[in-house]
Image (spheres, rainbow, N blue to C red):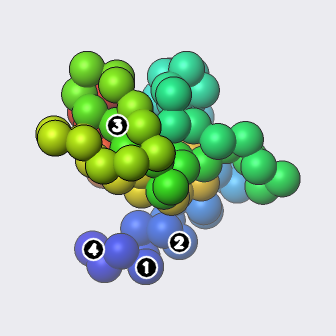
Amino acid sequence: MSKLMDIVEGHLNEIIGKHKDLSERRLSICLECPIMKETAVGPLCDSDKWIDKDNNSSEEYFQGATKGCGCRLSAKTALKSSRCIVGKW
């Protein structure tokens, strides 16, 4: 599936409540993440920050780090095929 279609499906799933239990479990993990950013549209995976698999984070790149994806987390967590950028879910 294309990235655009994934985005549309994630938002649609969020609106209709599809995969709600899965989304709630995933979102609870995201809300504890050091690169989660609260915004007016809800929590985002902050694309201005970096994180590694050990939960170390920074505003600058460091060895082994992955940049935040920038996704709106309530939609991303509702997409069954979606994955956390560092494998938390």
Q: Secondary structure at mark 3?
A: strand
Which residue matches tag 4? Answer: 1
Badge 4 local density, few (<14 within 10 Å), some, or many (20+)?
few
Mark 4–mark 1 Cα distance, whole angstroms, equals 8 Å
Quarter of the image where one finds residue 86:
top left
The answer to which of marks 2 and 4 sits earlier in the sequence is 4
Q: Secondary structure at mark 1?
A: helix
The numbered disc on residue 51 is 3
Mark 2–mark 3 Cα distance, whole angstroms, equals 26 Å
Q: Secondary structure at mark 4?
A: loop
Mark 3–mark 1 Cα distance, whole angstroms, equals 24 Å
Mark 1–mark 2 Cα distance, whole angstroms, equals 6 Å
Q: Specify the amino acid type for callout 4.
A: Met
Q: What is the tally of numbered marks visible in this picture?
A: 4
Location of residue 34 with respect to 36 vertically, above or below: above
Badge 1 local density, few (<14 within 10 Å), some, or many (20+)?
few
Which residue matches tag 1? Answer: 4
Circles 1, 2 touching at the beta carbon (< 8 Å): yes
Of badges 3 and 4, nearer the viewer stands 3
Quarter of the image where one finds residue 57:
top left
